[in-house]
Amino acid sequence: MRIVDLSAPLEPLPEGPEFVRIEIDYQDHAAGAATIERMFGVGRELLRDGEGWAGETIRHLSTHATTHVDAPWHYNSQIEGERAPTIDQLPLEWFYGPGVVLDFSERGEGEAVGPDVLQAALAAAGHRLAPGDIVLVRTGRDAFYGQPDYPARGVGVSAEGTRFLYEQGVRVMGIDSWGWDRPLHLEAADALAARQPGIFWAAHQVGLRYCQIERLVNLGALPATGFTVACFPLKLIGGSAAPARVVAILPD
């Protein structure tokens, strides 16, 4: 088999709002040796090459930074009249299944993808959705990952498009841009102009128990179908999301 990495790196991103910032302290082998001597009285002369352990401390990591899986709890406290599940409460079976890539990389910034467009893309991919499929939306905006305008770029999936996928049995859907919705500054402008709910964050707050994978990369390396996705999030108790190492597994 061949494994394709679909995850953005976990590396320091000290700029920006708290929900995207990543701060990491790195401890080298000399610092590790000093720690060992302090904790156990074992000096450098008793360590191989005079070195101790290397280590890292993540000082700040939002669960929504880098590649991550959103839980329904992120969208609303209640969905369909019941408490929305957190990331640790979701079935592991959701996060391993057949994948399909729907390519919208030629569409313009801020476009919303609805049911008709999704159905046409599925037909072009030669794929019929089945329960447990994991749908990956390619926008090509992973090329801008880490750049200041990255959150403002991308094609989004509409609330109606999200509901269409859900009704086919899809519980995990992902995208290679900053978020699943259209860029939020566009949705915000529309919501403020209309003065009504259901416009801002429309796909997130569609009222369904489903998961999004956001900030994927490298979807262009995949075929449309014929691969398996593994996207297990960290088991963060009570979490609205968790980072994940997302990979595609292809037959050799």
Image (spheres, rainbow, N blue to C red):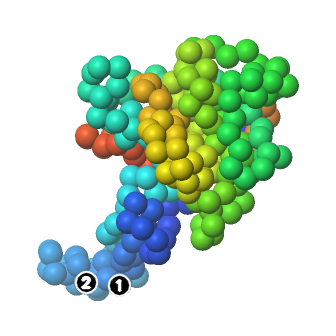
Left/right placement of residue 193 relative to residue 82 reads: right
* Quadrant in which the N terminus appears: top right
Residue 232, horizontal then vertical, whole percent = 46, 37
Closest to the observer, 40 or 100: 100
Q: CA distance from mark 2 to mark 1?
A: 6 Å
Q: Quadrant of residue 49?
A: bottom left
Q: Residues within 10 Å of mark 2 (few under 14, many from 20)?
A: some
Residue 121, horizontal then vertical, whole percent = 79, 28
From this view, report whether residue 73 is shown above or below residue 177. above
Q: Quadrant of residue 44?
A: bottom left
From this view, report whether residue 34 is shown above or below residue 129. below
Residue in view at x 52 percent, y 44 percent: 194
Residue 56, horizontal then vertical, whole percent = 36, 69
**The residue positioned farthest toward the front in the image shown:** 194
Q: Are marks 2 and 1 in contact (CB under 8 Å)?
A: yes
- Callout 2: SS: helix
Judging by the rendered image, the residue that carries numbered circle 1 is 30
From this view, report whether residue 236 is shown above or below residue 148. above
* Quadrant in which the C terminus appears: top right
Judging by the rendered image, the residue that carries numbered circle 2 is 34
Residue in view at x 56 percent, y 31 percent: 159
Residue in view at x 39 percent, y 38 percent: 75
